Amino acid sequence: MTSIQSIHLWNINFSAILLPIMKAQETIIRRFTHGSAGLRGLQILTLMLLCWLAQLLTSHLQWPIPGSLVGLFVLWLLLNRKVLPAAWVEDGANDLLNHLMLFFVPAMLALVDRPELLSMLGVKLLIAVLISTLAVMCGTACVVEIGFRLKHD
């Protein structure tokens, strides 16, 4: 059985919340073979549950930051402290990243309903989106490169 360190953040004992979830997930993981569709679904469900709990936390504490960012921070904290092994969410996270384009389909459908976005305003918006996308991609590449260098040094 995985040993869980006590995690206290903002006077909330997260290990008391996560321990039953992690024990149940560990039991289910033993029943599935590595890389099966059921295991990936469980990993995606775990990520969604973590995001949902973060949404609840931010709405309950009335924080002005999105719950998804808090969820990413909590996920990072759990992975960094080795409370949540990366293997427990890695395949599911990779599946979500592989199908990330599907999450942008509603944005493209909105273009069909709003033809004015295809005018000069749309060109300006497209340029802004392209520049910001390139900035995010470059920033992500730099962070990943720094992470690899730190890991291998």
Image (tube, rainbow, N blue to C red):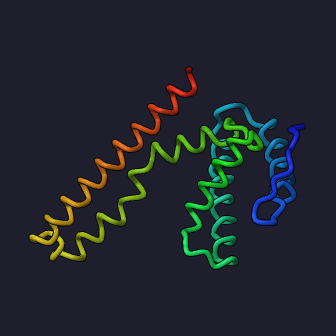
> Which residue is at a point 76% across and 60% down the rendered structure image?
9
68, above or below 82, in the image: below
Q: Nearer the viewer, residue 105 or 46?
A: 46
Q: Residue furthest top?
A: 153
Could you tell me how many numbered marks the image carries?
0
Task: For the C terminus, give its image quadrant.
Answer: top right
Residue 4 x, y percent position in the rendering: 86, 44
Q: Where 50 sits versus 64, above or below?
A: above
Please name whichever residue, 141 or 97, is drawn nearer the observer in this view of the structure: 141
Q: Nearer the viewer, residue 57 or 10?
A: 10
Residue in the foreground of this view, choosing between 112 and 67: 67
Q: Position of residue 63 (x, y in %)?
A: 61, 75
Residue 12: image x %, image y %?
Answer: 81, 64
* Residue 33 figure quarter: top right
Residue 119 lies left or right of residue 96; in this view the side is left
Relative vertical location of residue 121 with respect to residue 3 in this rendering, above or below? below
Q: Residue furthest left?
A: 120
- Residue 96, horizontal then vertical, whole percent: 51, 47
Q: Residue at x 29, y 55 (%)?
A: 132
Pick the quarter of the image with the N terminus.
Answer: top right
Q: Is residue 118 left or right of residue 12?
A: left
User: Which residue is rendered at x = 66% and y = 65% of the image?
Assistant: 54
- Specify the quadrant of the image occupied by residue 92: top right
Left/right placement of residue 55 relative to residue 102 reads: right
Name the image quarter holding residue 48. bottom right
